Amino acid sequence: MSKKSIHDFHQMVANGEKIVYLTAYDYLTAKMEEKAGVDMILVGDSLGMVSLGYDTTFPVTMDDMIRHCQAVRRGAPNTFIVGDMPYMSYQASDEQAVANAGRFVKEALVDAIKLEGGGPMIASRIKAIQQAGILAMGHIGLTPQFMGQLGGYKAQGRSAQAAISLVRQAKLLEEAGAFSILVEGVPTAVGKAITERADNIPILGIGAGPYTHGQLLIYADMVGLYDNFVPKFVKKYANAGEVMTNAFKEYAQDVREGKFPLDGEHTYKMQEEEVKEFTA
Ligand code: KIV
Ligand code: NA
């Protein structure tokens, strides 16, 4: 299967086909996701929690993101990859945003970048990045880099006024040139309204209801690898964490009881005469 482009995503929206979007942070996972036929991979700054063990996304650096985007690109050479701009890699100025977006493309060969926020400042960043020839995805609603202002990790747009504000933010980003917008953690009615008002740009959702043009999940949540905190919108498709922990336990027991390795089955052989000479 060849790598999808922005035209394929527009076509999918026009045909009413859902876009399948999933995060990945490393080579092995990316390889499995490409094999599974995922349409778009996000190397999210959720990397901070999932792969690096931080409590938030704030400490994630540009170098962290680039390193992991490179690994994901090697694992999924034929999948559309979005690199997530980490905290303070785009907030300071349009110039900073363009330079860092450029690093994602130049050093990790991603297809697009994503940045959080829906105000005029972010619209300006998106416009600048877009003018530099880079596809920029917006991200509104529950935006973890704004955790302090949002007052914690909770659904957004639950009042009529807040919902209207989110619909306006989506329009603002679309007019600024965002090629797509990700909507996170909002009631179904808000995800639906934003999707219906979008003018030929794919609206992707995570915890934004069933009506968006596509769905995103954090892969570690949906396979049961990350259990520190699992949001309401996650559906668990596997218990990979349990499967792996049990494998580690069995291995530990086998080693301690001398059941692994089994001579002959997991070992290298030497020719008889070599053994004789060696042990003589
Ligand atoms: O970092 C990430 O994985 C994200 C999604 C949770 C939306 O931005
Ligand atoms: Na993110």
Image (cartoon, grey):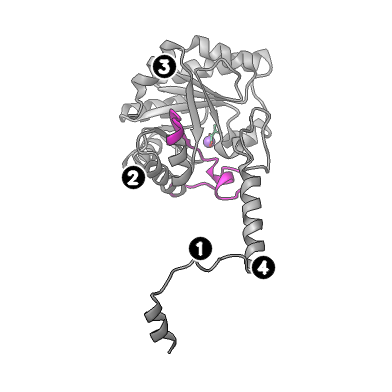
- Which label sits in the foreground, 2 or 1? 1
**Sequence order check: which comes first, mark 2 or mark 1?**
2
Q: Is disc 1's CB within 8 Å of ligand 1? A: no
* Residue behind mark 4: 257
Q: Amino acid at mark 1?
A: Glu
Q: Which mark is residue 265?
A: 1
Q: Secondary structure at mark 3?
A: helix
Which residue is tagged 2?
A: 107
Which residue is more in the foreground, 91 or 58? 58
Q: Callout 3, which amino acid?
A: Met
Label 2: state its secondary structure.
Answer: helix
Tell me which residue sits at (67%, 36%) in the image.
Answer: 230
Q: Which residue reaches farthest bottom? A: 280
Residue 52 located within the stretch drawn in magenta: yes
Q: Which residue is mark 3?
A: 12
Q: Position of residue 257 (x, y in %)?
A: 67, 68
Compute the Cα span from label 4 to label 1: 17 Å
Q: CA distance from mark 2 to mark 3?
A: 29 Å
Three-letter amino acid code of the residue under disc 4? Glu
Q: Which numbered disc flags the more N-terminal residue, 4 or 2?
A: 2
The type of residue carrying mark 2 is Glu
- Residue at image x 40%, y 20%? 9
Span shown in magenta: 35-63
- Give residue 258's position: percent from left, percent from top: 63, 69
Whether the residue carrying mark 4 lies under 8 Å from ligand 1 is answered with no
Give the mark nearest the N terminus, 2 or 3.
3
- Mark 3 or mark 4, which has the lower sequence index? 3
- Distance from disc 4 to disc 2, alpha carbons, whole Å, reads 48 Å
Check if mark 2's residue and mark 1's residue have beta carbons within 8 Å.
no
Q: Position of residue 252 (x, y in %)?
A: 64, 62
Q: Is residue 32 magenta?
A: no
